[in-house]
Amino acid sequence: IVYRSQNISIVSFKGCLHLTRRIKETKKENNFNMVKSSIAKYRTKCGTTPSDVAKQIVENGVSTLKSYDQLLESKYPYGPKEVSKLLTAEIIDPTSPNEILESLVTPTIDAISDCVSQISKLESFIGLSTPQMEDGNNFGVSVQLVVAKFLKESREKLEKQIDVTDYYTKRADAVDKLGLSKSTFAKTTTNTSSNSTGGKDGDEKKTNQSNVEESKTTGSSAKPDYFRLKAISAIDTAFYCAMRSTVVEMIDIYSCVIDNVEKNFERLSQPKGSGGGGTNMSMY
């Protein structure tokens, strides 16, 4: 009887431990489900989930690549030698913008910005698909980490190409060194007023205004130095080639991004499998 009662007490003690542990786990699950539920409501309120956005980007990947290819063919049809001749001939007035380059800057920056935006959305999709931290079955998470790292590096590389201020700064300095004649105009207006009382003609108020205009020309009126003009042409050519290389690199990067996401979409969206683990905003 004593042995059986001891056995019962031991079983009861183990049962209490199990019950206590289960209560703690239930609280954790309830907290997690609460977070998951709030995120789900937010996604529903926004209309589309990050997964829906990612699917749309992947599905439209080929058409997007075609638009980038079209940009390359229409705006960058020339090689370095050909474009150098064209840009040199374009320098009629060095102080005026180069029309060939100006026509390609805006569409190129727009395309790069669009590509960066799409990669950022894919990064968000992976981040919001990261599961809750737990032991085991983490191969899908390692896939997420590898792809997310590649997306981040690709985005940062393209973001650096959006800034074109360096080109305009170099060109402005080169034009300034040509020593072209510059005309300046200055006009100075001086107003003088005086009041007098008790004079022969009574109170009197006088106002005088004088204008001084000055026109000044500085710099040389001689023909610009040949090598200075060649320097401007070289800056324009280098900028054209750099922008063309950026578009080529953007096409390669975007191709790899879409390919990686498409091949691993199931792992990226459900790293624990269809039945394992939920998704929330916790970092793995």
Image (cartoon, rainbow, N blue to C red):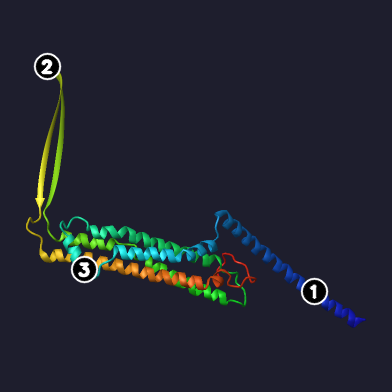
Residues at marks 3 and 2 touching, judged by CB atoms closer than 8 Å: no
Q: Residues within 10 Å of mark 3 (few under 14, many from 20)?
A: few
- Give the left or right position of residue 21, taking residue 77 as reference: right
CB within 8 Å, label 2 to label 1:
no
Tag 3: residue type? Answer: Glu
* Spatial CA span between label 2 and label 1: 120 Å
- Earlier residue among tags 3 and 1: 1
> In the structure shown, which secondary structural element does the residue marked by tag 2 occupy?
loop
Q: Position of residue 168 (x, y in %)?
A: 25, 60
- Quarter of the figure with residue 196: top left
Whether residue 68 is visible to the viewer of this picture, yes or no, is: yes
Q: CA distance from mark 3 to mark 1?
A: 85 Å
Q: Which mark is residue 201?
A: 2
Q: Earlier in the sequence, mark 2 or mark 1?
A: 1
Mark linked to residue 230 = none
91 on left or right of 151: left
Q: Is residue 134 left or right of residue 117?
A: right
Q: Label 1 neighbourhood size at 10 Å, few (<14), some (14-19), many (20+)?
A: few
> Type of residue at label 2?
Asp
Residue 94: image location, x then y, percent: 17, 58
Question: Which circle, 2 or 1, is nearer the viewer?
Answer: 1
The percent coordinates of residue 82 (x first, y second) are: 21, 68
Q: Residues within 10 Å of mark 2 (few under 14, many from 20)?
A: few
- Look at mark 1 in the image and give the residue it sits on: 15
Quadrant in which the N terminus is drawn: bottom right
Query: On the image, numbered disc 3 is attached to which residue?
Result: 82
Q: Earlier in the sequence, mark 3 or mark 2?
A: 3
> At 85% across and 77% down in the image, what residue appears?
9
Of tags 3 and 2, the one toward the viewer is 3
Front position in the image: 65 or 30: 65
Which one is in front, 231 or 47? 47
Dot in front, 3 or 1: 3
